[in-house]
């Protein structure tokens, strides 16, 4: 089983009370950051608050940031193809554990640099599409 | 034995091999977890859960002030912003928290991908996680429509109009999704219902996700 081995990767701590208390404190810190952001930077990631039908709007101000890659695909291909690619991507993600049956420590766990390059590629594609939209 | 019985038996064996059929949710089956300072990238799932809790609590407060009608939606939000004590911060907390939830869920998924934590026997964790991500995206997008300002109306038009491109069914789907030929009060009602129903669905998937994490333990780090 592809489980955490304390001998190899460091100690574990009991879920209760140690882990839940430490994670509870970390959660409070995260909440303080969130409320701080909300209070001091209220425009951050807020949808546009322009009143109804007051003028023309562009795609980036309408669409949330997480749909921008799909919208970029729509611009490059067509709405139908972008929808098909997005749905196919979702289906591929769902089916991933069923076609990727390789031993966990064969490729992905050994070639850390391959993972990093892939992450870099994904980020480039993401922000590249973002750039197309901007 | 019929083919159906054999298929059900195979499914039962598959689930049993992944510890999915054992009863009991709150047993201490995994008594230990990683020390959180040790592998910081392991924290994204917990942060996503925290943001989900923030969304549920702030959303319940917003529910008391929001009017899900084409005429009343924007007005009720302006009332909340300007007339209700602490209303503006509550609304922004919900909006920013929603974006943070999407961000943390995506980061969590990337972490699971890079650590191969989706592989056998964690298929159910992965399936429930992908379903949760889909629900998060749908809830976040439907939430942005609910303001029913210019951006909200246009987003509703875009999200529903997209299905026009589906062969044969598109011309039937769009009026059904919009509640008419163009977006209006009926469309807002549909997005509102979706936005309220999704957290309930997410709680069901969360239960599966959490149960499987407790039963199978923490995946190995990078």
Image (cartoon, coloured by chain):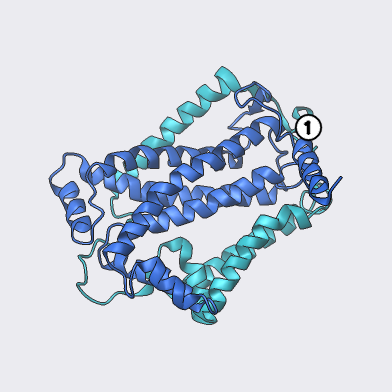
Chain colours: A cyan, B blue
Marked residue chain, label 1: A
The quadrant where residue B212 appears: top right
- Horizontal side of residue B26 vs A48, given as left or right: right
In the depicted structure, whether residue B107 falls above or below residue A5: below
Name the residue furthest front: B2
- Horizontal side of residue A90 vs B81, given as left or right: right
User: Would you call the spot at circle 1 few (<14 residues within 10 Å), some (14-19), or many (20 or more)?
Assistant: few
The quadrant where residue B52 appears: top left
Where is residue A12? Give x, y as percent: 68, 25
In the depicted structure, whether residue A69 falls above or below residue B44: below
Quarter that holds the N terminus of chain B: top right
Where is residue A74? Give x, y as percent: 50, 77
Q: Residue at x 80, y 39 (%)?
A: B13
Q: Residue at x 18, y 61 (%)?
A: B71
- Horizontal side of residue A69 vs B189, given as left or right: right
Quarter that holds the C terminus of chain B: top right
Q: Residue at x 28, y 47 (%)?
A: B91
- Horizontal side of residue B1 vs A75, given as left or right: right
Name the residue furthest top: A17
Residue B162 visible from this viewpoint: no
Residue closer to the observer: B144 or A42: B144
What residue is disc 1 on?
A8
Where is residue A113? Give x, y as percent: 73, 56
The quadrant where residue A13 appears: top right
Residue A78 visible from this viewpoint: yes
């Amino acid at each position: 089983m592809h489980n955490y081995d304390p001998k190899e990767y460091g100690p574990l701590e009991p879920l209760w009370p140690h882990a839940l208390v430490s994670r509870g404190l970390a959660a409070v810190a995260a909440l303080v950051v969130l409320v701080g952001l909300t209070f001091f930077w209220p425009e951050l990631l807020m949808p546009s608050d322009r009143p109804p039908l007051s003028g023309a709007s562009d795609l980036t101000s309408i669409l949330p940031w997480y749909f921008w890659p799909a919208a970029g695909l729509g611009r490059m291909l067509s709405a139908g193809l972008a929808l098909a690619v997005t749905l196919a991507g979702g289906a591929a993600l769902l089916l991933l554990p069923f076609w990727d049956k390789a031993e966990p420590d064969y490729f992905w766990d050994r070639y850390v640099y391959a993972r990093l390059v892939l992450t870099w590629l994904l980020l480039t594609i993401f922000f590249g599409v973002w750039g197309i939209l901007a | 034995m019929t083919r159906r019985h054999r298929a059900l038996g195979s499914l039962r064996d598959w689930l049993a091999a992944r510890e999915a059929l054992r009863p009991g949710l709150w047993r201490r089956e995994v008594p230990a977890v990683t020390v959180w300072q040790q592998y910081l990238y392991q924290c994204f799932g917990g942060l996503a859960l925290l943001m989900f809790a923030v969304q549920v609590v702030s959303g319940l407060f917003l529910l008391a002030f929001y009017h899900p009608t084409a005429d009343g939606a924007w007005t009720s939000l302006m009332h909340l912003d300007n007339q209700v004590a602490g209303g503006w911060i509550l609304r922004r907390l919900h909006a920013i928290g929603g974006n943070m939830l999407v961000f943390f869920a995506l980061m969590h998924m990337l972490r699971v991908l890079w650590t191969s934590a989706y592989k056998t026997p964690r298929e159910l964790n992965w399936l429930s996680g992908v379903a949760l991500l889909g629900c998060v995206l749908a809830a976040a997008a439907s939430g942005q429509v609910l303001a029913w300002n210019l951006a909200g109306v246009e987003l509703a038009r875009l999200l529903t109009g997209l299905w026009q491109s589906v062969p044969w069914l598109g011309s039937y789907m769009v009026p059904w999704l919009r509640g008419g030929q163009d977006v209006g009060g009926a469309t807002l009602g549909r997005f509102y219902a979706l936005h309220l129903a999704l957290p309930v669905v997410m709680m069901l998937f969360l239960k599966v996700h959490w149960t499987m994490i407790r039963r199978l333990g923490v995946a190995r780090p990078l």
